[in-house]
Structure formats: structure tokens, C-alpha cells
Image (cartoon, rainbow, N blue to C red):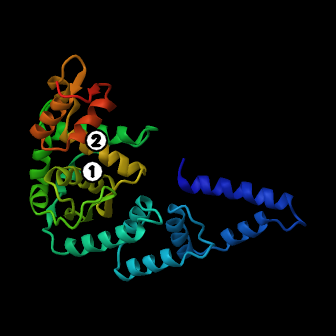
Amino acid sequence: MGRTVVEEQLSKVADFVVDRLRGQQTPVHEQWALIKATTNEEKVYSRLIGSLGLSPYDDNPEVTKVLQQLTSAELASTILEDLFQAADTLSLRKLAGLTTEASNYLRHSRQLDVSALDQMELPSDTSPWAWKRGKDATEIVRQFLGVAATDSDGADKLFTMLGLDSAIASGSSIDEDTSLSGLLDREQTEMKVALIDKSEAHRRFAAARAAYLAWASGRFSKRLLTSAVTRDQQASRAFAAELLAPFAYIKARGSQSMLSLNQVQKIAAELRVSPQVVRYQAKNNGMKVVDMVM
């Protein structure tokens, strides 16, 4: 069921309730009147403010000031949506600054040819679990590249095909914040990427996420790579984790469905990912991780 259908049905319910309260003046009447009078431009603002858990009908001067600065930087609406989904009132100013810096860095980034993404059919998004689409997408990429699930080189083959290996090598190192790791701008078959993590392992993870979002968001897409729990961000993380650290590879390195701390660290070094990626891959696929050196 699409968003428009849901909104229409909820609107009918609200109209029915207000009509039944005819002759009374309640907060419901007041709030519903405000919502119905909201213009399209105001709806965009309302969605951003709502992402922070605030009411757009209250006074939010600090948030409004940050939003005005972001607007003056001419950032795309999809970038703003990704940013506000990942932020809260305490982190918004810092993340807004990082986003602006990443946008400036992006202008000087190398143009990449991502036409190969159009040759692969993205899996449907029908599962209740966002991670499943990301994992299914990994299988499609492997089939396209002709690599097995146990092949640790699948990610590097994708990076080379899309030119993302150069973006990984030239990461801007603006900051290292787990809430924001990069920005991408795709137009048709060309894309620019700004990867802002300091470590190569984190930039590799961000590059894989950028490939997924450029694929899933379409031929004209401008996106942030964030820690938000929206479906596409979650799917991008699942895609990157399975592509960079295939569970079949991890399982083959384990013993009796279990990984020790030194095994996690050794596998992470082999795959050039952070130990957290290996740990989460193991745990999410039913392996026990023992937090001790064995």
C-alpha cells in the first residue's frame, strides 16, 4: 500500500471524527484545520521537523536557523531528508556542518561511470525486513560479477567496475562520525561520491553503501549515507556487510558455529573491514561470538 493511499484513508478518518464533534471546539479541530491548510512547501518543512520528533506548529528557532543555512547551500531535498532522519536536536548542527563540508568536497570529486548498475535488476522491496532487500541485492551483484558467496574479492570487483576504488583511496577525512559517512550525487550513468571517514575500512563500507543507494534510488539521486533506520539506509548497510564480509566466508573460518575475538580480528584484517562488521555478520546469521582470545 502506497503512502498516498494511507494518507487519503487517514484523512477520511480525521474528517469523520471532526464531523462527529460538530458544534464543539476541541484541540482536534484546531490541529486538523492547521494540517489541512498546510501548503506543499510547508509540508516539506513539516516532514523535516517531524523527523526530529518536534511539532512544525511550535516555534523551533535553532532548527529553523540551521535549515535556512542548509537551504542557502542549495542542498537537494533528498539530502535534507536523509540528514534530518539521522539527526536529533542535539546533533543537527554538527551533522549539518559535516553535510555542507561533504557537499563542497563532492564538487571536486572524480566523475565515476556507474552504467553497470543499470544492467542489474534490483530485487523487489516486499519483505517486512529492510535488510533482506540489501542481502538479496548482494546475490544479484555476485551473479553479475560471476563470483561465489565465499569469494572475498566480490566487493573489490564491484569497486573497480564502478571506479569506487579511487574514491576509497582519496577519502576526504573531514571527520569520523558514525551518523554520517558520505554523500553521493548520481545523474544518469555518472556519479560523484564523497567518503568522509578517516579509516580505509570505514570508507570501503561507505563505498559499498553508496553503490547500493545509487542503484536503488535511481538514475537521478542525491543521497547521504547515514545511520538512520529508514528502509533504504538499513538495506544499504546489509548490502555492504554481506558484500564486504560474506557470511559464507566467515563461517568457513569459524569453528563449530562459533568465532573467538582473535578470529573476528583476523577475518576483519583479511577482508579489510572493521571487526564490528564481522561480529555483526556472524551474530545476525546465528553464529556465537565469544569475547575472549582463544
| Residue marked by disc 2 | 137
Instruction: Tell me the quarter of the image containing the C terminus.
Output: top left
Q: Is residue 153 visible?
A: no
The amino acid on which the numbered mark 2 sits, given as a three-letter code, is Ala
Q: Give above or below for 255 relative to 15.
A: above
Q: 172 or 218, which lies in front? A: 172
Q: Position of residue 98 (x, y in %)?
A: 30, 69
Residue 210 position by quadrant: bottom left
Q: 57 or 92, which lies in front? A: 92
- Residue at x 31%, y 55% (from the top left corner): 178
- Residue at x 18%, y 28% (from the top left corner): 293
Q: Position of residue 217 (x, y in %)?
A: 33, 57
Q: Residue furthest right?
A: 23
Q: Position of residue 204 (x, y in %)?
A: 17, 51
| Residue marked by disc 1 | 212
Q: Which element type, helix, strand or loop, lies under badge 2? A: helix
Q: Is residue 94 left or right of residue 265?
A: right
- Residue at x 55%, y 75% (from the top left corner): 60
Residue 191 position by quadrant: bottom left
Q: Are marks 1 and 2 in contact (CB under 8 Å)?
A: yes
